[in-house]
Amino acid sequence: MLKSLLQDDAGFIVSAELVLISTIVVVGLVVGLSEVQHAINSELNDVADAIGSLNQSYSYSGMSVCKPGGCGAEVAGSCFLDTTDDCDNNQCDMSCDRPVHEAPKGHKI
């Protein structure tokens, strides 16, 4: 019985094919998901640039109510000027760093 079990290779070809096909599928998924990640980061960077380019400055003048007997209510005006923030208008790259050389731990190139 042990001899017939060792000589039985009926499922070997199917197993090898499944391993090869699953390896190709996994490699394809890793590459595909990496490209999806870069595309999503690029689109989110575009959305952030669009929001950052909006001018959010505002101002309003004050008002007061004055009658012949004197002034009553009064509200002072206000003003806010929007300035450029970090990463506005595509000033920084959010997708990938440049490749670096390999070196032993603790050594800088």
Image (spheres, grey):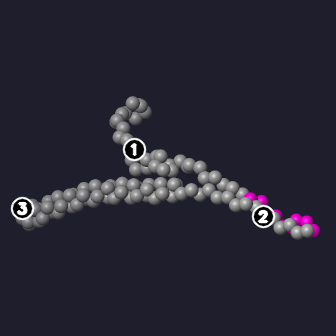
x 56%, y 49%: residue? 84
Q: Secondary structure at mark 1?
A: loop
Residue 2 at least partly seen: no
x 51%, y 54%: residue? 53
Residue 12 in picture, x, y percent from top left: 11, 62
Measured Cα–Cα span from mark 1 to mark 3:
53 Å
Residue 67 in picture, x, y percent from top left: 88, 69
Question: Is 25 drawn above or below residue 95 in the view shown?
Answer: below
Give the farthest residue toward the front. Answer: 68
Q: Is label 1 or label 3 in front?
A: 1
> Sequence order check: which comes first, mark 1 or mark 3?
3
Measured Cα–Cα span from mark 2 to mark 3:
98 Å
> Sequence order check: which comes first, mark 2 or mark 3?
3
How many other residues sit within 10 Å of disc 3, few (<14), some (14-19) or many (≥20)?
Answer: few
Residue 65 in picture, x, y percent from top left: 83, 67
Is 95 part of what is drawn in magenta?
A: no
Is 72 part of what is drawn in magenta?
A: yes
Measured Cα–Cα span from mark 2 to mark 1:
53 Å
Residue 56 appears left or right of 30: right
Quadrant showing the C terminus: top left
The three-letter code of the residue at mark 3 reads Gln
Q: Magenta region: which residues?
A: 69-77
Q: Secondary structure at mark 2?
A: strand
> Sequence order check: which comes first, mark 2 or mark 1?
2
Residue 47 in picture, x, y percent from top left: 46, 59
Label 3 near label 1: C-beta < 8 Å? no
The residue to which callout 3 is attached is 7
Residue 93 at least partly seen: yes
Q: Is label 2 or label 1 in front?
A: 2
Identify the disc placed on residue 97: 1
